[in-house]
Image: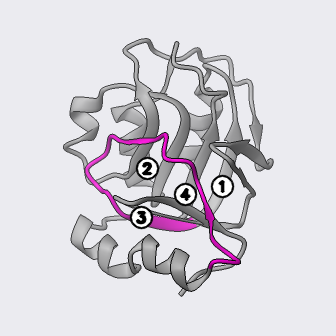
Amino acid sequence: MDTTEPEAAAMIRSICDLSDDHPALARTVEPVFRDFGGLRAFHGRIATLRCHEDNLLLRQTLSTAGEGRVMVVDGGGSLRHALVGDKLGALLLQHGWAGIVVHGAARDVENLRDMPVAVRALAACPTRPRQKGIGELEVAVTFAGVTFRPGEWLYADENGIIVSATPLQ
């Protein structure tokens, strides 16, 4: 998805407004994530993956058509091995993913910052991930006070992240 930051921001209203207008629908994600990519605002249907310090299944999944979805990764909050970096950032762009939220670490952050890609993670870690392919796709994952379900909607901007079972207008 070749979306520049101003275009992405124009596609949705502020998540503060969305949250205010839909208090019964919008679930607020705890503010534990840092921005690592060049895009600050993004949204889309949720795809999920649960993995621990291993990103082979994530790499394989991001190599398929994203169709504007947001990949939500439950890495168990591990900061020992980064799950996303500039190579996976390039896959997000190449295959039309709207962005990625990782309950874990990122690396190559100096490169991600210069890419037109949306990446949220807990922290930076220089250690590469394992490559065993262990994980679960399209399962409900819970972290940061919210359960993320495949097919639901995620909205993010500089104010944080919200999730809804249905699209918010």
Chain part drawn in magenta: 23-44
Q: In this view, does 86 lie above or below 145?
A: above
Q: Are marks 1 and 3 in contact (CB under 8 Å)?
A: no
* Mark 4 residue element: strand
2 or 3: mark nearer the eye: 3
Question: Whole-Å distance between the Cαs marked 4 and 2?
Answer: 9 Å
Question: Whole-Å distance between the Cαs marked 3 and 4?
Answer: 8 Å
Q: Are marks 4 and 1 in contact (CB under 8 Å)?
A: yes
* Mark 2 residue element: helix
Q: In this view, does 93 lie above or below 165?
A: above
Q: Mark 2 points at which residue?
A: 92
Q: Name the residue under label 4.
A: 70
Q: Name the residue under label 3.
A: 42
Q: Quadrant of the N terminus?
A: bottom left
Q: Do the residues labelled 3 and 4 touch (CB within 8 Å)?
A: yes
Q: What amino acid does circle 2 point to? A: Leu
Q: What amino acid does circle 4 point to? A: Val
Residue 41: image x %, image y %? Answer: 36, 63
For disc 3, the neighbor class at 10 Å (few under 14, some 14 to 19, many from 20) is many
Pointer 2 or 1: first along the chain:
1
